[in-house]
Amino acid sequence: DQQVKQNSPSLSVQEGRISILNCDYTNSMFDYFLWYKKYPAEGPTFLISISSIKDKNEDGRFTVFLNKSAKHLSLHIVPSQPGDSAVYFCAALKDTGRRALTFGSGTRLQVQP
Amino acid sequence: EAGVVQSPRYKIIEKKQPVAFWCNPISGHNTLYWYLQNLGQGPELLIRYENEEAVDDSQLPKDRFSAERLKGVDSTLKIQPAELGDSAVYLCASSSGQGKETQYFGPGTRLLVL
């Protein structure tokens, strides 16, 4: 049972435009969400996070939106740059119990120059 | 500040052979995680340590996998004997252990079992 889903395996956008990566979750016990970026042959790098008590968190070109009622979050990158090309993983965490990150399967973003 | 260090970066072995991976977490991080990442999927937790105690090893296949973190700092993950299906990337992560803390990942060890 996949509790965190990233239904788009890939996304291609033009440099300078907005990239929107989506993530859905099924477990209402998740209360903290993170986005990681992964380049080939490297480990995932933390990008941005959001607590369930918020609906938006912004850090420079990156903004994460959380819609708890829809169990949906999205990552917006504006403007997109070629260096943003990577695989993006959505992850969710429960503050109780296992405290292990539950990851989605990732979305490969390609930003075209 | 140094990040999470893992070695080796790559390992090729024949099935039924043993293999070991090493991880040194970020200095001061009490919590250490080992994750398994199969191709095209997100990482999945194998084991979590709080200092030297394994507090969650429910997903670790204990018939062939073992792990240790003897002094509460660096850790070793072992597979004996390795099977073809163990080919994957083994990621180590660490965090400060302060509630909803961010987990920081090492570069991983890519294992190929022939």
Image (cartoon, rainbow, N blue to C red):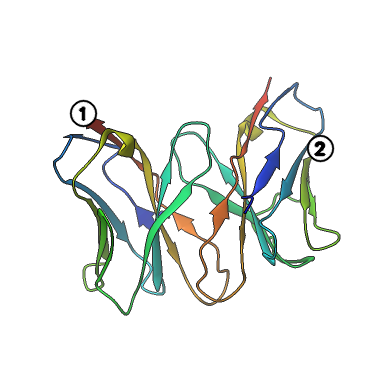
**Which residue is denoted by mark 2 in the rendering?**
B80
The picture places residue B25, in percent across and down from the top left corner, at 68, 54
| B1 sits left or right of B83 in the view | left
Amino acid type at circle 1 is Gln
Q: Is residue B20 left or right of residue A44?
A: right
Does residue A60 lie above or below A52 as drawn?
above
Q: Amino acid at mark 2?
A: Gln
The residue located at (29%, 58%) in the rendering is: A24
Mark 2 secondary-structure assignment: loop
**Label 2: few (<14), some (14–19) or many (≥20) C-alpha neighbours in 10 Å:** some
Badge 1: chain ID: A
The percent position of residue A48, horizontal first and vertical second, equals: 37, 59
Q: Going by the picture, which residue comes out furthest to the right?
A: B70
Give the quarter of the image for residue B33.
Answer: bottom right
On the same chain, marks 1 and 2? The answer is: no
Viewed as shown, does residue A71 lie left or right of B59?
left
* Disc marking residue B112: none
Looking at the picture, how far across and down is residue B102, in whole percent? Answer: 51, 63
Task: Quarter of the image for the C terminus of chain A: give it.
Answer: top left
Residue at left offset 75%, top offset 43%: B22
- For label 1, the crowd category at 10 Å Cα-Cα, with few meaning under 14, some 14 to 19 and many 20 or more, is some
Q: Residue furthest front?
A: B1
The answer to which of B114 and B34 lies nearer the viewer is B34
* In front: label 1 or label 2: 1
Looking at the rendering, in which quadrant would you find the N terminus of chain A? Answer: bottom left
Q: CA distance from mark 1 to mark 2?
A: 45 Å
Q: Is residue A91 above or below residue A112?
A: below
Q: Residue at x 24, y 33 (%)?
A: A111
Q: Give percent across and percent down for residue B45.
A: 59, 54
Q: Report the residue marked by disc 1.
A: A112
Q: Chain of mark 2?
A: B
